[in-house]
Image: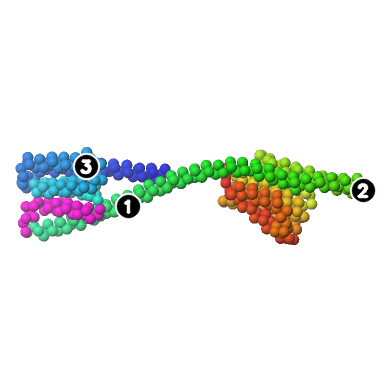
Amino acid sequence: MPEMSEVARLETSQRRLDRWLMWVPYGALVCSSAIVPIGAAADLPTLPYPAIGAIVVFTAAWMLWWTTLHPQWEHDRTRMTIFYAVLVGLIYLLVWASPLFGFFAWTGYLFTAYALKGRLPRLAGASAVAVATAVSQVGGFQTVANPDAWGYFLILLLFNVVIAGSMTLLTTMTHEQSAKRAEMIGQLAEANAKLEAALKENAGLHAQLLVQAREAGVHDERQRMAGEIHDVLAQGLTGIVTQLEAASAVPSSWERHVTAAKKLARESLTEARRSVQALRPQHLDAAALPDALGEVVSTWSSLHDDVAASLITTGTPRSLLPEIEMTLLRTAQEALANVARHAAAARVFLTLSYMEDVVTLDVHDDGVGFDATISPEISSYGLTAMRDRVLRVAGTLEVESEPGAGTAVSACVPALGVAA
């Protein structure tokens, strides 16, 4: 992830800088030791050179053991406090031996943020190093013992303490902000990982639900076909038989009864074709949903030339999951079938709307309308089947109708693309 790479880059840079800074005190200690004999003519050391050499070696070994060889002790507050306290004592001892060790004394600032935790301990440690630095700058403890040099010493001490305290406080605040930023980036990366895992899990659950929906759809489709056969085909065949029997019983009116039987046969054939096509919407095999709906509307109009039907598509069409497109197509077929059976309409309008999160299909006719509370036969295998089908894909179906004001059916389904 980009967040993790950013954290790794910051940590790598910080470790590289820390390693470089850890070697600076060794260089400063060597340089100070080298110039002490050079400056001996002007300022003799307090201790003999062998003693100074022993202190220098011990100081180098102390830093090597506590920091270079055991970097993991950085997080042990007790050990680091001991290390820093002894190091400051060695700095004072070296400055007392020779003020030229002031070139090494300032490196104590480098260990302040490394060894001490918290603002107050770091300010106290930096102030202790500032005192040693000021003592070396005025010429050592011998000069500080002279009351005439106190004014000069206090000025240098104030200057060193203020500068050291300010820089330490600034460094501490920078480290705290960097730590908070790294923690926030880490938390963001963890949250993104959890979100990605949740999305994968949701995708798996969604696929499982679709499989279950397909299995449930087999049973529902059988019930729907049974209802259509009962409501349409059986009634049509019964009507045909009735008309033929009437023609046989009353020969004088046989022509009228045969004509009626032919009309019933044609209507039953139309409904049978529509039911068979609804078993598998072949329109979607080779065409996008808007084109498939256009074909359905065109075919329906050719069978019902007394009703004008039109389709309008809004938004940007895009490929949806097959279950979603199948639901919308069959909803349109069912709605048009209801218009043909019950609406007695002159016009029917279909609107397919692609929006950001949902896709809607609206079917509105200008027919006689109905009151579902007193006309349950209209919704027995029509609206109920449509509503169940839409609910299976987490959609909604709304029906508005009033006697004499036509009927409006609106199906709203989630706009789940193929890539989802």
State the count of labels: 3
- According to the picture, the residue beneath numbered tag 2 turns out to be 250
Task: Give the residue type that dot 2 points to.
Answer: Val
Tell me the quadrant of the picture where the N terminus can be found: top left
Tell me the quadrant of the picture where the C terminus can be found: top right
Which secondary structure dominates the residues rendered in magenta?
helix
Helix, strand or loop at mark 2: loop
Q: Position of residue 104 (x, y in %)?
A: 16, 46
- According to the picture, the residue beneath numbered tag 1 turns out to be 177
The mark nearer the N terminus, 1 or 3, is 3
Closer to the observer: label 1 or label 2? 2
Q: Are marks 2 and 3 in contact (CB under 8 Å)?
A: no
The mark nearer the N terminus, 2 or 3, is 3
- According to the picture, the residue beneath numbered tag 3 turns out to be 67
What residue is at 12 percent from the left and 51 percent from the top? 136
What residue is at 11 percent from the left and 46 percent from the top? 94
Q: Is residue 143 magenta?
A: yes
Distance (Cα) linking label 1 and label 2:
102 Å
Could you classify mark 2 by the number of other residues whose Cα lies within 10 Å: few (under 14), some (14-19), or many (20 or more)?
few
